[in-house]
Image: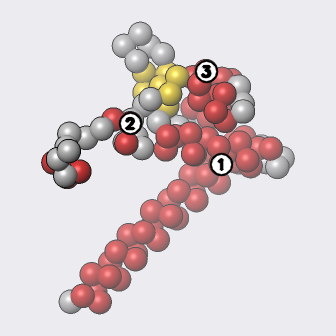
Amino acid sequence: MPPRSTRPVDSLDDDDYPAYTMGRAADMLGTTPAFLRALGEHRLITPLRSEGGHRRFSRYQLRIAARARELVDQGTPIEAACRIVILEDQLEEAQRINAELRTRGAAS
């Protein structure tokens, strides 16, 4: 087997690959397709569409949806849950960038 770095990218290893149908995604999260559509309406996740127009979700989107479901299950309105998840995601990204910049600064 060739080293991992020279193999073609495997779609199933890609967190952003839209591998899951609406029904499968809802089953995995223990929710309904309507809940996933609502997350799309609130712009938390934007599933890709298959050639036939069907929604497809990635593992990353399923993790985001699972966090929103957790908040909604705790009594948070869906609009607020979506905003919280967006802010948490932005904070995580900012912290990652900050740590990377600190590492670069320490190496200089």
Instruction: Give percent across and percent down for residue 30.
Output: 72, 33
Indicate which disc residue 13 carries: none
Label 3 residue SS = helix
Can see residue 37? Answer: no
Which numbered mark, 2 or 1, is in the foreground of this view?
Answer: 2
- Judge the density around disc 3: few (<14), some (14-19), many (≥20) Cα neighbours within 10 Å: some
Q: Quadrant of the N terminus?
A: top left
Amino acid on which disc 2 is placed: Leu
Which label lies toward us, 3 or 1? 3
Q: How is the image coloured?
A: secondary structure
Seen at 44% across and 29% down, the residue is 19
Residue 67 is marked as 1
Image quarter hosting the C terminus: bottom left
**Label 2: which residue?**
12
Give the residue type at disc 3.
Gly
Give x and y (percent) for residue 12.
Answer: 38, 36
**Residue 5 falls left or right of residue 80:** left
The residue sitting at the right extreme is 75
- Give the structural element (helix, strand or loop) at label 1: helix
Image location (x, y in percent) of residue 84: 65, 54
- Side of 70 where 20 appears, left or right: left
In the rendered image, the residue lying farthest to the top is 52
* Mark 3 to mark 2 CA distance (whole Å): 18 Å
Q: Earlier in the sequence, mark 3 or mark 1?
A: 3
